Amino acid sequence: MAVPLTLYIDNRLLSPWAMSAYVALVEKNLDFELRLVDLDQGEQRMAPFLCRSPAGKVPVLAHHDFYLSESSAIVEYLEEAFPAPEYAAVIPADTRARARMRQVQAWLRSDLAALRRERPTEVVFEGMQRVPLSDEGQADATRLVRVAGCLLQEGQKHLFDDWCIADADLALMLNRLILSREEVPARLRDYAAEQWERPSLRRWRDSRGA
């Protein structure tokens, strides 16, 4: 019997956090239904979606009659509800690595606002024409490169010993710069490129053209 999971995401598949939840489901090899929410038409502010997501945000995971929003909460729920070794792990097992992963995720979701505004995911997924970064946007870009460089040593393929969901989140943030032809060190470009070719991330990109 198929697992009764549904993921509600934006209909243009542009949300980086929807991608994060989607990738976690794919990595765990879970069967799920995808439901698209038309944000341009304000569907996220209408019933019954507001009953599923009181804040009117995507993504939202439905598991039976349980609804959960916020991508990091969704990923942690999936890890606990469908644990390793029966299902692939998407979060480090080591306590300190798991704490560091949460730190990286929280930082990516709460900081770099100017960069996210000036290099939206349309740049990454739809090839939107870039505009010059503002001073604030350039400061964010510099901080992103510096922090990523501290997290990833030369030749390091993942943030930790094994792949985790924060690798997908960080690669997408780096690609806001890389795919708009900003200056990014070669080792960070290589890291982002390798993440981008991971089957779960390719499936997300392929689904956008379906």
Image (cartoon, rainbow, N blue to C red):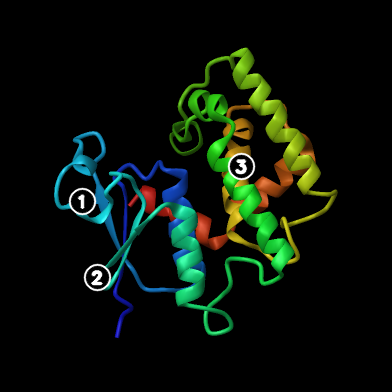
Residue type, label 1: Phe
User: Is residue 205 in sight in this rendering?
Assistant: no
Q: Residue at x 59, y 14 (%)?
A: 134
Instruction: Say which label, 2 or 1, has the lower sequence index.
Output: 1
Residue for badge 2: 65
Mark 3 vs 2, N-terminal side: 2
Residue 178 locus on image (x, y percent): 64, 34
Work out how far the residue at label 2 is from the one at label 1, CA to CA, in angstroms: 13 Å
Secondary structure at badge 1 equals helix
Residue 111 lies left or right of residue 20; in this view the side is right
According to the picture, the residue beneath numbered tag 3 turns out to be 107
Q: Give the camera-side residue of 161 and 175.
A: 161
- Secondary structure of the residue carrying tag 3 is helix
Q: Which residue matches tag 1?
A: 49
Disc 3 packing (10 Å; few <14; some 14–19; many ≥20): few
Q: Which residue occupies 25% across, 47% down? A: 37
Label located before the other in sequence (1 or 3): 1
Q: Amino acid at mark 3?
A: Trp
Give left or right: position of 52 versus 195: left
